[in-house]
Image: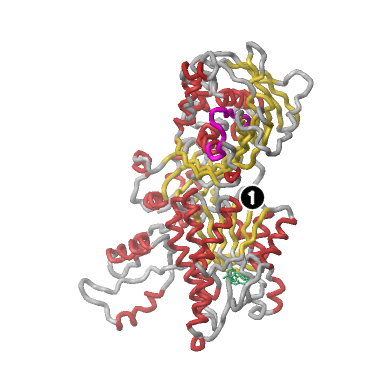
Amino acid sequence: MALNRDAIGKPIGPMKRDYTWKDAVLYALGVGAGFSELDYCYEKDLKVIPSFSIAMIFDFLSQAAIASGVNLAGILHGEQELIFHNPIPPEGTLITTGRIVDYFDKGKDKGALIVAESETVHSSGKKLFTNVITVFGRLDGGFGGKDRKKSPVDFPDRDPDFIVEAAPSPDQPLLYRLSGDIFHLHVDPEFARMAGFDMPIMHGLCTHGFACRALMASLVPGQPERVRRLACRFSKTLYPGVPIRTLIWKTADGKAVWRTVNAENGQVVIDNGEFEYGDIPKDEIRFDDRVAIVTGAGAGLGRTYALELARRGARVVVNDLGGSRDGAGGGSSSPADRVVEEIRAAGGEAVANYDSVATAEGGANIVKTALDAFGTVDILINNAGILRDKSFVKMSAEIWQAVLDVHLKGAYNVTRPAFAVMKEKGYGRIIMTTSAAGLYGNFGQTNYAAAKMGLVGLMNTLKLEGEKYGIKVNTVAPIAASRLTEDVMPPEMFAKSKPEFVAPLVLYLCSDRCPVSGNIYNAGMGFFNRAAVVTGPGKVLAKDDQLPTPETVMANLEAISDLTGAKIYHDLNAQVGDALIAFQAPAGKSPVEESKGFSSVPAVFDAMPGAFVAEAAAGVNAVFQYAIAGAGEWHCTIKEGTCTVAVGLHDSPTCTLKIADGDFLKMMNGQLPPMQAYTSGKLKIEGDIMKSQLIEKLFKLK
Ligand code: NAI
């Protein structure tokens, strides 16, 4: 059976793998770690050996081999490359998506190479590693394909800088196989004999794990987070119990080459090894290997988003119908094509799509374009838009509907199929485009304002439905010079309002660094602020069973309308909860005064610096990292009697507190004692648990 050429580029996965610290420790033991490397073997402050990654996605290797149609009787794991983007956390879920990249023909009787790539993202949304495997199909050569000429790794002509001896136990494969590769060849003597071996052989990836440990011990001792790349070719099999030796040459700053040999006969068992190490490149927000759809990207804001995303590594679907400003008449492919050309000329990757967002088929086809070209969708910016302004009495049903169809229904049409892909893969970023006309009102734009505010409602609920799948949904109200605003904006403002001033916020919200979901931001001319639906504390007018009257409403309108102490609610339940509390509050007291509760996670962190008790912090230097499922990450730095709170992850927190957003709010509002949260497993603490106990003393939040 020939190799299946149709499989090239088709998505494999997403494949999910839950793991705990026990899996990481089992792997470490399987590749020879022990008491001398307790960091990899003990759940306290556990560090994960980077090569654990490949054991966790072993299924991808099988899936790629099966999809390629290679003759399974002749396959060998040829080459292996791992590129590390972030350290592997000790627990979580790994979501892996990949594809077959290409086939190479070594010639009849010489075999074929199947190259496949995958990306693995952690349930926290962080991209962890890229994997490139080359499967050697001994029985599939001579299919008439191209050959691959790859220059071998250049080994210096001198003694190695490091030689690391190791002695895998005769039983090593029995332990290693529990990490996922349970192929009989490594356990069943009879099977091994049938395959031409004297006994079961070592897993190549087990020796690879020994080599990874040797490289770390020599070049980045105790710092697996500094491993950036590990590549090699498997060249010979090895029997369990045979001692090995890993030879390492440093070749440049942060670079080394290596090979592992059979210490008994000198045969090279892993060759062409490359190892790169160093710190994670600093803080640039990148979209490498992300796939983005931008609707209405043929001009204006959408074009700028598409160009910027591609410049930072995203592969982009440039959708644009190429219609007129009011959406009347037909479309044209040239606006989308021009933007695709611009992206490609700058070295980026993009494809055009000319469908209208206003139809369900159009929406489905836009997402299909992304899947066909790039295999997935990570980012969707709902941006396409038209205007048909008329004062309300002149607003015909047709004009009303045309605007709703593009903006509101358009977002539904594209988001629904995109959301399904994101939900499956456990990651997504969605942007809605609203407008100040919707948020605050604008004469002559009832259709547009209604549609734009409808998008806020769509976001409010989608953010809840996406929460547990790592999908964040936010909304932007831009101000930018475009054909939509050329006759609306004063000329001086128009000149200063390049879409480039809006794009930075939109790109951040699309990135894996974005901690927020369900927020609305105004953005224009380099000015950014948050807009929100806020709710005042209100007043209970019903007394016992007595119904309030219009007159009591009239008499109390000021108190009902008062926004002092107003709140932003995370969802309907939080608001209803406060309404119930209001009924229980003694007459005359504002429910906010009474409950003094936090209604959102960000509100807690906003309040933290003000609640800091400097006297209690004498001699305390610590960074408390909070990972609040459903809300994001914050860290709080206590240093020399001061407290600063920032959004996001800190590089080296003293301890990390992990808790779901609802439980966190209960804890902060005094309804869940911290000790109970901890013992019930609702609160997990990693790192220095003792230091975490200071938190209660350091802050008087209630
Ligand atoms: P623009 O007119 O330059 O770009 C909109 C693009 O959407 C056009 O290229 C158009 O061909 C495309 N489009 C229209 N209908 C489509 C459909 N059915 N399917 C696919 N593509 C379609 O306008 P601009 O200013 O860049 O607007 C982008 C978004 O920002 C719109 O949603 C707009 O309502 C919103 N907005 C813009 C503001 C501004 O100051 N420019 C203010 C507030 C909101």
Q: In which quadrant of this rendering is ligand 1 seen?
A: bottom right
Give the residue at the far bottom of this rendering.
393
Q: Is residue 206 left or right of residue 628?
A: right
The image shows residue 56, relative to residue 334, as above or below, that is above
- Residue at (57%, 15%) from the top-left corner? 167
Question: Looking at the picture, does residue 694 appear above or below residue 162?
Answer: below
Task: Name the residue carrying label 1.
Answer: 286
Position of 657 relative to 186 (above/below): below
x then y, percent, for residue 59? 50, 36
Q: Could you tell me residue 667's position as x and y percent?
A: 38, 49
Q: Residue at x 67, y 27 (%)?
A: 273
User: What x and y, as percent, mark residue 643?
Assistant: 54, 48
Q: Is residue 70 magenta?
A: yes
Q: Extreme top residue here?
A: 264
Q: Is residue 16 magenta?
A: no
> 381 or 687, which lies in front?
381
Q: Amino acid at mark 1?
A: Arg
Which residue occupies the foreground of this view, 535 or 241?
Answer: 241
333 displayed left or right of 89: right
Q: Which residues are magenta?
A: 66-79
Q: Residue furthest left?
A: 545
> How many circles with numbers are drawn on the protein?
1
| Residue 453 in the image, given as x and y percentages of width and height | 49, 71
Secondary structure at badge 1 equals loop
Horizontal side of residue 610 vs 138, given as left or right: left
Above-or-below relation of 518 to 323: above
Which class describes the residues within 10 Å of circle 1: few (<14), some (14-19), or many (20+)?
Answer: some
- At x 46%, y 32%, the residue is 21
